[in-house]
Image (cartoon, helix red, strand yellow):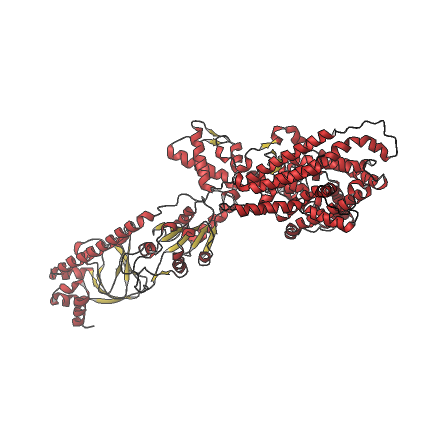
Amino acid sequence: MTSQEIVIWLQEHTTLGILSSAALNAIAQVLEERTLPQGSNLVSAGIPPEALYILKDGQIESDTSNKSNFALACGFLPGAVINLKELLLDELTPSTIIALTECQIWVIPASEFRTLASQYPEITQALSRSLAQELAQVTSALTYEQERSVALRPYLVTKAQRGIVGTSRYAVRLREQIREAAADRKSVEIFGEPGLEKDNIAALIHYGSPKRREPIIKINCGILQTSGIDLFGRAGGKPGLLEWLGEGTLVLNNIQELPPELLPAMVQLIKTGTYNPVTRTGEPTAAPRSSQARILIISEKTQSKIERCVGRVIKVPPVRVRKTDIKAQVEYYISLYVRSRGLPKPHVTPEALRRLQSYDFPGNLKELKNLVERAIVQAGVRQELTEEIFWSAQTKKKEFRVNLLNSYPGLRKFLRSDWWPDRINYGFTVVVFPILIAVLFVGPQTRDRNFALNLFWAWWWPFFLLIFPFLGRVWCSVCPFMIYGEITQKLSLWLFPRQLKRWPREKAEKWGGWFLFGLFTLIFLWEELWHLENTAYLSACLLLLITAGAMIFSAIFERRFWCRYLCPIGGMNGLFAKLSMTELRAQQGICSATCTTYQCYKGGPQKGEGMETNGCPLYSHPAQLEDNRDCVLCMTCLKACPHRSVEFNLRPPGIELWTTHVPRKYEVALLFLLWGGVYLHRLPQLQSYLGLQLDLNDFWQHLGLSLLVLLIPAAVAWVGYGLIKLFNFQRKPKSFTELAYSYLPLVLGGNLAHYLHLGLAEGGRILPVTLATFGLNSEHLPVLIAHPAVISFLQDATLIFSVLLTIVLTQKIARQPLRSLFWQHLATIGLAASMRVLIVF
């Protein structure tokens, strides 16, 4: 360019245009043109200016050293005059200026410019204009920052409250995920239950990222306007939060509460980083704008459309799976509280810590924090936080429970000894059972002359039914069927070393219950059609068939597969065990926090107090049991546990049925089958009462009537439920499957009332019957039998008590007013009355 062209360019593009032509000509004569490479420094901050620079072409930007005021940072376009003020006022350069692109620069060395300034005083006028432009620029930047601050202030997150406390694998993994998320700008969904401080995790991600100096705001999606104007702003009008946020971080809290109208726009923002400002009705859709903000989403429920768009998902583990971190969390919360109030730090007792670890904390960290702070206040001047102070850590599962092992140490000693149940099983049952089977086969075939048959029907059945409310499935721990199953398993492995098959759990859970239901149906029909109660060899065949099933499946599968899924007696035991007033459980907190071997479940060598065992025969973990169905009280877990986590609790009978119970259709079918069995046992009396003239000596008529009789309780209960649904308009009743379990006390009571007659009228004849078995004279031996009036009274009392328990249990399970369940209560009373007519005589 010629000198004249340079003068014209300076007049049109720079603040020096106000100078005279002579001054501009003088400046044009001394200008030196240089090329500044991209990324190189033109000016360094804090030093005397070396020259006056005029940007001819390209783009440069100041990188201010004043980190507290970003308004001083700015970009420069062609025509910018740099270092004018500093040269005229002898100041240091305020900032470093960097070339964003390759630039063409005109340079006047400092000494030459000062000479020109002394020759042409009017150059100082250009300084005034330059200062006015800079002032306007700074004022504009400060005004923008002020408006931005006002807009963002209500939503700002100023800092992360705390880091991730704990050393569990869950805590370690969560810290890793936070670090990974902070390293990039991908959108993140932070998913988890309430009370897990997910917003704090979002803050940790932001303040650990390179953009930590940018603002972070948190918006509750539930309060957003359906138009989205809060976030997106109005086209041609007020900016939205996204525009004010710039490159900051937007935290969308409780995304599950987002108005459905905003979901498509939010998906667009997360997926593409663009949004459309809101327009007024009738106006065309605004052009999409790009957002530089980072999106962090906090959610308590899965949102499939959102999940498909985000770059990564962080699932925050609940406190109940981080039991090992509870101690560290408690200590941390105590330290925070006492430090903020200048209090001495109290000590948490081991018992209190174990109680906290046994609690599930549905409110998670928020609940734990509140609990700790309340405990410190409750403790006052005391320096110990005891178990009693943490009163709210008492869970529903622990209400009304008494650990009998703590109350009676001798009971713990017995149950952990070899006597229970091994010495009983292998020293007594394994010997007595084949003797009884032999007596049933070769002895007299009627109950009044065969003591084994008398023991089975008049002693075992009443006793068996009586122990359910007290000890649940305890019979299964000394059951001869599985003792011989275990012997078969050990012998087969000795003879043919191999790996036993693992349980097909999914299929067994689905079909096992229906299999044992079918077996029990056949047993009932066999008992009725062939008079098993008074035929010794057929009773022996029944016992041997069940034993054969246990032996066969024990030779195929590991542990007690038959006992858990397929045994008809075991299925009945598991059903009635739900009513038991005792339970075997383990403290979840202790198991999660301290146990790493799971010896109670898997088995293993001796460890500390824990003995060597083969693990639970039913593959049940005592800390995960929801009811008594899958526990046979063999006490293997009690013997194996080295942490004293296992408890043998006294509890309200059947409490699980209205708290943690999971209904199963095959159990309901078995329940009604067992109930129908009461009517089947009294088939002659029922036929007489109904005035039927069917010939029970005819096999097919007998079979058909037996099948119909088995359906009576189910039919009546179903009609009662149908009437509840028909007349109960305001309240929707629970499902038939759930409500059917409320009949359990009456089913047990009806069976017990039936067998009480055998037990009290024939059980006392055991001594003369024993001698008669071997052909000896038994007339001189005593007989202990109850008067018929006593038997009738006990049967009546049993049925009445069962009815009352059934009504109470129905109310507990249904949780509805008494009048809403009138028809089910009427069905209960009607069926009980019909059983009374058939049984009591």
Q: Residue at x 66, y 30 (%)?
A: 411
| Image spot of residue 709 (x, y percent) | 70, 46
Q: In which quarter of the image is residue 713?
A: top right
Q: Nearer the viewer, residue 121 or 164?
A: 164
| Image spot of residue 673 (x, y percent) | 68, 45
Q: In this view, does 225 lie to the left or right of 505?
A: left
Q: Quadrant of residue 7?
A: bottom left
- Image: 101 above or below 769: below
Q: Nearer the viewer, residue 484 or 172?
A: 484
Q: In which quarter of the image is the N terminus?
A: bottom left
- Image: 802 above or below 251: above
Q: Is residue 828 left or right of residue 201?
A: right
| Image spot of residue 547 (x, y percent) | 76, 45
Q: Is residue 388 left or right of residue 793?
A: left
Q: Which residue is drawn at 77% across and 45% down?
A: 542
Kindly tell me whether residue 416 is visible in this rendering. Answer: no
